[in-house]
Image (cartoon, rainbow, N blue to C red):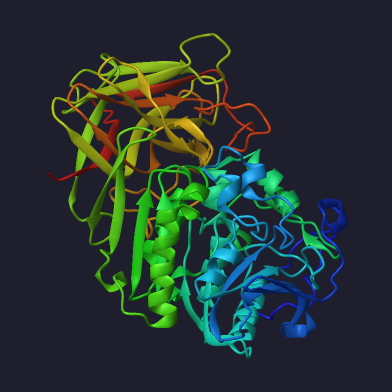
Amino acid sequence: MVRPASDVPTHRPFEYRLAAPTGPPEARGARPPVYRRELDGNLLIERDVAVPLRHGVVIYVDLFRPADGRPVPALIAWGPYGKHADLPVTRLYPDGGVAEHQLSRFTGFESPDPCFWVEHGYAVVNADAPGTWYSGGDATFVSPEEAAFGHDLVEWAGTQPWSSGKVALSGVSYLTTSQWGIAATRPPHLAAINPWEGWSDTYREVVRHGGIPETAFWPYIARRWAYGTNLAEDLVAETAEHPFLDAFWASKAPPLEAITVPAYVVASYSDQGLHTRGTLEGFKRIASERKWLEVHGGKKWGYYYSPEGLARQVAFFDHVLKGLDNEVPDWPAVRFDVRTDAATSTRKASTAWPLPDTEDVVRFLDGATGTLAAALPSTAAVVAYDAEQLGRARRRATFDWCFDEPVELVGGARLHLWLSAPDGDDLDVFVALQKLDRYGDLVGFQYYAVFEDGPVALGWLRVSHRELDPERSTEIQPVLAHRREQKVPPGTVVPVDLEILPSGTRFEQGETLRLVVQGTDIHHYPRPLTHPVHADRVNVGLHRIHTGGEHDSYLRIPRLRA
């Protein structure tokens, strides 16, 4: 079924494909909306408050505020996961770094804890976005329509008798991705945002990594979002219909440059393949004059609900929403971690991201020695690996750089490769940067919010998507255009550039940076553990990496100046 979503703004550039919802709300513990009011100590709770939005759409929110009725700023959590909090982070992801005792029973998935924030003088508005659960309208996701409806909720919250008139957006993942879109509409009562690890370009960062379809998280999450009583956007069908970055996917990449409100942005190196890139791109591109970035090496939920994370949030919101004179104006523009391993890191400060206090280092792949050399090898060499991992040859190619002095590598990297495939006309390439200790053992890092044996960083490329966007690409960051398919005749050697996602890692003397190149995912975990999977691959037979001589395959990576 294809038709416009009901009651949407007129600026929608195309028609979404709508279908029946994944299931009824009651299947996931939601109950039909009936307004209820209750007291829990100093917490006044109003359930199923009906909020009218544009075009006659009515959504339902749960409102938590101080019982004494004094006007307070409001924090809005906008997302599709259900304000009834049927699956808290602690139950769904017990290895996510959050203990049961840290959250009250009112805390929605990836949302601010109402008990904590009301105690600190705020109201919390947990919203069921249009079309989800029992809210009216049809559900569209990361869309201009959704952003416009979010705009209306901000204005409603900013004009209620219990409100101070200052409103902010808070929450993790989707609840951050929605912040980018809503803030770009510039609601007059929106005074701040706190994007905490959320993508900003749905196609590049979630759906197709380097052009390779993601086949586990995206289909799962698209179904999880779509519980309701009306129609919901059929993202699985739309993904199949839109293999390239067209107007459909462009609408799911909010106009970041339109954002001007104060922003405290938190990213991590650990959410490779989901949030790392998008959060850092968001910070780089928003036009806010007052913006602060923090890049940590831990787990997103663990840090969001940690004492340190909450203290930073309180300081930010107290300053921008309440006007308190505190330490926030003296915060460095950027704070970032440099990781030693999964449990150890050092925090540093800078003035911008990408860091101005780095220098790019170029190391050339040497297929003859399996190293990353300081100079282009004069002798050509070819390294082949079995891209399908069927046992015909080595399953990966590796290139090592052993350090003779301590080094800190911080930021995104660029991998330039000369590739060929004798038996196929396309190649899916999977890349990792890893750390080896001085004994040659692999050092693991926090990864995808729940794992602790992850890489330094990851990159991907479907070679037929190798065309670059010249306006977005830089010397250190190649950005793919994804506008068309360019197949490679079997045996033809072609140059390609991969974006390796940002990381921050310290290497001591005698430790090694290893570059891994192979034809399948670097990490494999048992289902149903959520992580990026790419089962729809195009590889056939061997891949060959050409190094030295006329083929200047290299890694360009930023090194922190001493």
Residue 557 in the image: x percent, y percent? 27, 40
- Give the quarter of the figure containing the C terminus: top left
* Image position of 284 with respect to 70: above or below: above
In the picture, which quadrant includes the N terminus?
A: bottom right
Q: How many marks?
A: 0
* 243 to 229, vertically: above or below: above
Q: Residue at x 50, y 43 (%)?
A: 273
Left of 143 or right of it: where is 259? left
Question: Image point 66% across, 43% down: which residue?
Answer: 92
Q: Is residue 162 above or below residue 391?
A: below
Q: Vertically, is 481 above or below 547?
A: below
| Left or right of 476, for residue 180 | right
Asked whether the viewer can see residue 528, the reply is: yes
Name of the residue lying farthest toward the front: 41
Residue 354: quarter of image: bottom left
Q: Is residue 282 visible?
A: no
Quarter holding residue 532:
top right
Q: Nearer the viewer, residue 125 or 11?
A: 125
Q: Residue at x 55, y 18 (%)?
A: 541
**x, y percentage for residue 527?**
67, 30
Looking at this view, is 547 or 306 the one in front?
A: 306
Q: Position of residue 52 (x, y in %)?
A: 75, 83
Residue 77 position in % (x across, y down): 61, 67
User: Who is closer to the viewer here, 34 or 274?
Assistant: 34
